[in-house]
């Protein structure tokens, strides 16, 4: 909705004012007006379709079809408020679990970015960041148990091998963690490398992965 609102504003700015001048100038302004009106009509049509599930927003969008140029900005301001409220309702946020102080700031920054990616609909990016969160937490847990920093001794170690090492040390991990890691890795591979089939996770799938990731991190540092 926000993009359509912005397109309408831009089209409105492009509408030329009526003025006298040479025939060439008049023709140019007429063509510019036709292009702006076409852009305006298309943006309003998109907005009508986007607001079909929201009665209040849809009624405002319907008013745009018959509104004068001077009335449109006020209607758009009302639509922008509805769009902002809708985004805030969809935003996923959660509190951080108790964490070791040396990784707390790093995890907090990553969680903040996950929230932004999720709210913006960048679901693959959010899932990939979940992999980074798990990597940070699992490496720190291994250090707690063994006193060894694998980021220095084995910086290229994958999450699967890290989980195996933790299990070998008797650390109880969630049984579904390996499947979670596999899904995150597949998302990363399909995002970074060209594949025949593009993996496009849904909002619900992404939310489940994020919440599961946070649950795993919380259990690691109870």
Image (cartoon, helix red, strand yellow):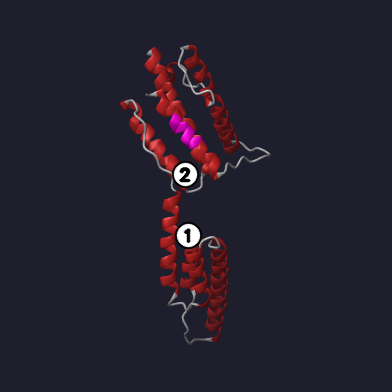
- Residue at the spot x=50%, y=20% of the render? 163
The answer to which quarter of the image holds residue 214 is top left
Q: Pick whichever, 116 or 170, lies toward us.
A: 170
Q: Quadrant of residue 188?
A: top right
Label 1's element?
Answer: helix
State how far apart marks 1 and 2 are (Cα): 17 Å
125 and 218: which is toward the camera? 218
Judge whether 205 appears above or below 12 on screen. above
Q: Is residue 7 visible?
A: no
x, y (%) of residue 111? 41, 37
The residue where tag 2 is placed is 117
From the viewer's perspective, tell me whether residue 77 is left or right of residue 167: left
In the picture, the quarter occupied by the C terminus is top left
User: Which residue lies most toward the left here?
Assistant: 101
What residue is drawn where x is 55% and y is 78%?
28
Residue stretch in magenta: 209-215
Crowding at dot 1, Cα within 10 Å, few <14 / some 14-19 / many 20+, comes out as some
Number of on-image labels: 2
Q: Residue furthest right?
A: 196
The verdict on residue 157 being magenta is no
Q: Nearer the viewer, residue 207 or 200?
A: 207
Query: Element under label 2?
Result: helix
């Amino acid at each position: 909705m926000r993009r359509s609102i912005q397109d309408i504003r831009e089209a409105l700015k492009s509408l030329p004012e009526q003025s006298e001048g040479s025939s060439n100038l008049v023709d140019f302004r007429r063509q510019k007006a036709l292009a702006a009106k076409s852009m305006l009509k298309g943006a309003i049509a998109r907005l009508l379709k986007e607001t079909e599930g929201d009665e209040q927003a849809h009624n405002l969008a319907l008013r745009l079809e018959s509104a004068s140029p001077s009335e449109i900005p006020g209607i758009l301001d009302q639509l922008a408020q509805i769009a902002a409220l809708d985004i805030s309702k969809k935003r996923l946020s959660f509190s951080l679990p108790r964490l070791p102080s040396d990784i707390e700031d790093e995890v907090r920054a990553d969680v903040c970015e996950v929230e932004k990616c999720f709210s913006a609909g960048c679901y693959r990016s959010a899932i990939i960041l979940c992999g980074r969160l798990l990597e940070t937490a699992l490496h720190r847990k291994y250090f707690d148990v063994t006193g060894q920093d694998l980021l220095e001794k084995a910086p290229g170690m994958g999450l699967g091998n890290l989980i195996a090492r933790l299990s070998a040390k008797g650390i109880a991990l969630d049984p579904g963690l390996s499947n979670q890691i596999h899904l995150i890795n597949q998302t990363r591979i399909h995002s970074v490398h060209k594949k025949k089939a593009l993996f496009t996770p849904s909002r619900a799938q992404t939310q489940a992965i994020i919440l599961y990731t946070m649950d795993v991190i919380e259990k690691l540092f109870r």
